[in-house]
Image (cartoon, rainbow, N blue to C red):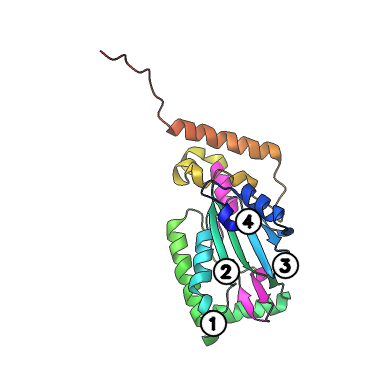
Amino acid sequence: MLDALDAESTHRDAEHLLCDSGWSSCGAGDWAVAFAAPDADVVARISPFDPVGPYTVRLYDEASMTGRVPRLLAHRRLAGGGDLQVMERLLQVPEPEAMDFLARFAEPEPELAALAETVARVHADARSDLPWCGPLDTNPSNIMRTLAGQLILTDPYYADGRELYATAEREPDRFTLVIPEDQRRYLTEIPLAWSGPWSLEDRAALRTSLRRADNRRTPRRGPVAAAP
């Protein structure tokens, strides 16, 4: 099904493709929305703007042998800076149980040592490569359970959204220099289901400010001289 998405496909195209194929909305966070497959224990996470998505996918791939990360079925980077991940369906975990897992991960216990090493190594690369990549996310909601009963770690990397968006508002010229337009085209379309609301007027104002900054960085062409 995902072969229908090409290099120009955006998060909107991905959502339409899933909905037209019978997938249904099953959740939303600050950065992404989730859809559940109609006939399988599979979910898709779609973000309009997710700089750390490729690093999360890299973690899921490199730590897959530990059995402590989600089983990733597919990944697509989307036009404009979006990200699509398709993975196994997971179950929520009571907070005390999640906090216990995080405490064992922080030591780490021998059982979790390989996971901790991979998390740290990929995170170091993300912090080196990406502006505004935050510290590891220790939110207990990132600990979930597979349908087989295994506790796993999900989505430990994140962009420091508060600082990232504040910089975009305060210093649009610096922001547009650091993150190219084709990697942030839809940065005002993240759902902000937990941290919102974000008014349509403020979103439009930020888009206008960044567009003007992009235009200031694009050399203007003068009149073309007539050929002799």
Spatial CA span between label 4 and label 1:
29 Å
Q: Marks 1 and 4: in contact by CB < 8 Å?
A: no
**Looking at this rendering, what residue extends furthest in the bottom direction?**
110
Magenta stretch?
A: 140-168
> What's the residue at 60%, 51% (across, down)?
162
> Regarding mark 2 in the picture, which secondary structure is present there?
strand
Spatial CA span between label 2 and label 3:
17 Å
Of the numbered discs 4 and 1, the one sitting upstream in the chain is 4
Of the numbered discs 3 and 4, the one sitting upstream in the chain is 3
**What residue is disc 4 on?**
46
Of the numbered discs 2 and 1, the one sitting upstream in the chain is 2
**What residue is disc 2 on?**
72
Q: Does the magenta stretch include residue 122?
A: no
- On the picture, is 67 further left or further right than 26? left
Relative to 93, is 178 above or below?
A: above
Spatial CA span between label 3 and label 1:
33 Å
Of the numbered discs 3 and 1, the one sitting upstream in the chain is 3
Q: Position of residue 204 (x, y in %)?
A: 64, 36
- The residue type indicated by label 4 comes to Ile
- The residue type indicated by label 3 comes to Asp
**What residue is disc 1 on?**
112
Circle on res. 39: 3
